Image (cartoon, helix red, strand yellow):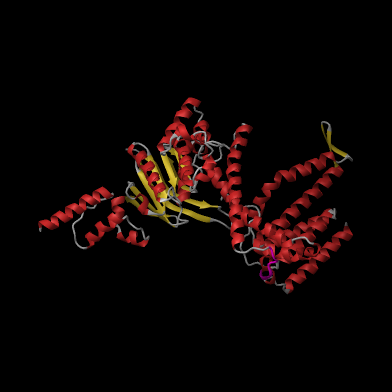
Amino acid sequence: MSNIIDIKDLSYVYLPGTPYEQQALKDINMVLNQGELLGLFGGNGSGKSTLAKLLNGLLYPSRGKVRVCGIDTSIKELRNELWKKVGLVFQYPEQQIFEANIYDEVAYGPRNLGLKEAEVKSRVYQALEKVGLLPETLVNLSPVKLSGGVRRRIAIAGVLALEPEILILDEPMAGLDPLGQELMLDIIKKRQEMGTQSTIIISHNLKDIIALADKIAILEKGSLLFYGEVAELLENIDILSRFHLELPDYLQVVYALKARGKRTNRDISNLDEAGLELIQIISSQKGN
Amino acid sequence: MNDIKLGQYVHGYSLIHLLDPRTKIICCTFIVISILSNHNFWYLLAYLGLILAAIKYSGIPYKSIWRSMRGIRYLLLITFLFQAVLTPGEGLIQLGALSVTREGLSIGLINLLRLVILFLGSILLLMTTTPMKLSAGLEYLLLPLNKIKIPVQHFTTIISISFRFIPTLVEESIIIKDAQRSRGASFDSPKIFSNIKSYLAILIPLLASSMLRAEELAEAMDSRCYGGNPNQYRMQSLKYRRVDIYLIIFMTMVLFMGLFLG
């Protein structure tokens, strides 16, 4: 597997040389393989969104190097083409909808790619299907009339229609009802199952996506505090407690059992595995 | 967040920051009157020096002021060129059918100076006064208009709300711009039409969210019993100090000097 993202000694400063100068990122190093899902965590103002913009070419490093899909973002001409490969879904993307009907809204990106209208159409329909909407009934509606959750899915479809190699979602769950959150997880899951596309999810809630992520990065005040596999993070009680990272219930059960001296498998990252593990523990208990 | 927004308040403790907002507003009005009623080059130059000294004193770096001046550079350039070319008088340089005249150059230079002074004066006021203080000062100074049935406090509420929301709108427009750029919108394409379309993609969502925000704000104000009465508490927080009075006396002198010189 090749490195789709390669970040070396990255620093970023906002408004250098003014009274509002602010160091947003400090000496970040990380590598992401193709097809992996990265969960990016951190509190407000920790630099998550800045990092996303650096990966998409909207910003370029003050110091250090960022290579995305083999493209060095410090070169302006290349950076301006990066949107074709890295799809960035901002926080509350439903606020960016501007076209009069849903078809045109989703087609905005593909048309900017310069695709033929037939190809645009198939991309729009596929993208809407990917976010769990029925294209035939929707395309002529005005986005204004729909609920916030549906509008967000349309906005995400607008980025998926670009068929990006890397998809970055900034707080995709924020402000959604439980059903909406589940649908969002489904969209991400389906994308991961394709295997070749990478996804980065920015969130301040670990619980949301720990079951999906391959790698976790934790930012604090612009520094990378932790970067590694999910299993490594779960072992690292220090960081978990320091950030008040609340684990999903099933993991809490597993870890509580571990704390009581039960032998547990360290590679549990979803509910099914946890269930199997519990069954094993209980049956071994009975054996005694 | 690529740049400081034009006239955004910069926190500080300089003498200029601590002046009463009313003093600053009165001084700015004096500046406007004396600049517009006077066309003596040396007087204007001295005025420019005065304002530059005040900026220095306020602790705002010249660099950020210079940067915000770039926003009006075309206005300045066009004003100067039009004056230089369109004023009749003794020709200096002939450019085809147009001639740059001596009178034109001097009027152009004076108007350039006037614009720069006005710009610097207002930007100094905005950068050293919080929106709250500014609207309290305005409300106090305009209060006599209440006598002729002009609802001053509504005006000042509107003004302070717009001041309050300028940075929010700018920030939001930057986010939306980034979002549309991520979908391939180009803002510096050689094709004008596609640029216009890209800007529409910012303006429409911005307008929609502003309407929504205005509605929510109105409801929030209603639910906290906003009645449009003068904000006594805010106005009582204003205090003249000795330095305010000295400054106003000084600026009045400068104003009269200008009126006589003019």
Residue B230 is one of the magenta-drawn residues:
yes
Query: Which residue is nearer to you in this view: A131 or B40?
Result: A131
Question: Is residue A116 visible in the rendered structure shown here?
Answer: no
B208 sits to left or right of A249: right
Q: Residue furthest bottom?
A: B242
Residue A39 is one of the magenta-drawn residues:
no
Q: Quadrant of the C terminus of chain A?
A: bottom left
Q: Which residue is painted at 56% across and 52% down in the image?
A: A15
Q: Which residue is painted at 59% across and 57% down in the image?
A: B219
Q: Is B22 placed above or below B212 here?
A: below
B184 sits to left or right of B125: left
Whole-percent x, y for residue B65 in the image: 66, 54
The residues colored magenta run B228-233
Q: Which residue is painted at 57% across and 44% down in the image?
A: B205
Whole-percent x, y for residue A134 in the image: 43, 35
Magenta stretch secondary structure, dominant: loop
Q: In which quarter of the image is the N terminus of chain A?
A: top left
Whole-percent x, y for residue A20 in the image: 57, 57
Q: Which residue lies furthest to the left in this view?
A: A288
| Res. A237 image quadrant | bottom left
| Res. A283 image quadrant | bottom left
Query: Which residue is nearer to you in this view: B117 or A249?
Result: A249
Query: Which residue is nearer to you in this view: A159 or A157?
Result: A157
Q: Is B247 placed above or below B71 here?
A: below
Q: Is A211 placed above or below B228 here?
A: above
| Res. B20 image quadrant | bottom right
Q: Which residue is painted at 23% across and 53% down in the image?
A: A266
Question: Is residue B248 visible in the rendered structure shown here?
Answer: yes
B220 sits to left or right of B258: left
